[in-house]
Amino acid sequence: MHEDIEKILVSQEEIKKRVKELGEEISRDYKDKFPLFVCILRGAFVFLADLVREVHVPISVDFMAISSYGGKTESSGQVKILKDLDTPIEDRHVLIVEDIVDTGLTMDAVTRLLKTRKPKSIKICTLLDKVDRRIINIKVDYYGFRIPNSFVVGYGLDYEEKYRNLPYIGILKEKVYKGGSNN
Ligand code: XMP
Ligand code: MG
């Protein structure tokens, strides 16, 4: 285990099993719908890559990068598009693939924005859901794991761009983001 990790919250094996289940469920729900998976960069890239390989119906993929104005470990709900989709979504079934839903502000802003482009449907699939932290009541259609309120990294999630390559979801040691050493 990495020295900055307090505890492994979701192991590599647990993630693999759950992603396969999600892929099967999504395959059933989107059969003959040719959905567009919208990956929210950068955190969701690992989840997307594993998820699409467990989906056995035709899909397409596009990417969107957003930044939320906020602190290092919290979001503010105001989002700015850094990279927009290249694909028109009018009349498409859109599935947003996100790493984590926390307050819900980011997903609320993104879905509101995408709805203005008149997709046929829009749903959210998040690997992690911190339900206790929700301040906006958004509907999460698919989730991998519900997790308590700790700052987590790994499997795509970062702290200051580090730890995305860890194969598990781990709780980051508090000293890493509250002072402490920064290397
Ligand atoms: P909201 O609050 O808008 O937040 O639902 C979603 C975004 O906040 C970031 N976030 C985290 N990132 N570990 C992370 O690496 C966490 O525990 C965490 N909690 C929230 C993340 O960018 C997500 O897209
Ligand atoms: Mg994110």
Image (cartoon, helix red, strand yellow):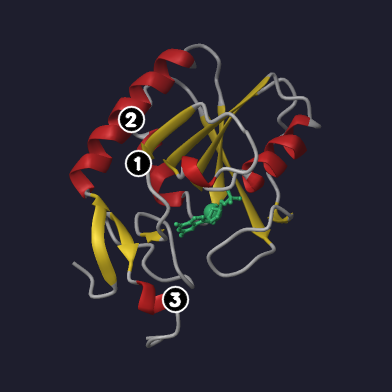
**Image quadrant occupied by the C terminus:** bottom left
Examine the rendered structure and indicate whether residue 100 appears above or below residue 170: above
Q: Is residue 172 left or right of residue 41?
A: left
| C-alpha distance separating marks 3 and 1 | 29 Å
Which residue does the numbered mark 1 point to in the structure image?
A: 50
Q: Which residue is drawn at 48% across and 55% down?
A: 43
Is label 3's Cβ within 8 Å of ligand 1? no
Examine the rendered structure and indicate whether residue 76 appears above or below residue 47: below
The tag earlier along the polypeptide, 3 or 1, is 1
Element at label 1: helix
Label 3 or label 1, whichever lies nearer to me, is: 3
Q: Which residue is drawn at 71% across and 30% down?
A: 89
- The crowding category of the residue bearing disc 1, from other C-alpha atoms within 10 Å (few below 14, some 14 to 19, many at least 20), is some
Asked whether disc 2 touches disc 1, contact meaning CB atoms under 8 Å apart, the reply is yes
| C-alpha distance separating marks 2 and 1 | 7 Å
- The crowding category of the residue bearing disc 2, from other C-alpha atoms within 10 Å (few below 14, some 14 to 19, many at least 20), is some
Element at label 2: loop
Q: In this view, does 13 lie to the left or right of 27?
A: left
Residue 86 seen: no
Q: Position of residue 178 (x, y in %)?
A: 45, 79
Residue type, label 2: Glu
Label 2 or label 3, whichever lies nearer to me, is: 3
Examine the rendered structure and indicate whether residue 162 appears above or below residue 68: below
Which quarter of the figure has residue 18? Answer: top left
Element at label 3: helix
Which residue does the numbered mark 3 point to in the structure image?
A: 177
Q: Position of residue 44 (x, y in %)?
A: 47, 49
Which residue does the numbered mark 2 point to in the structure image?
A: 54
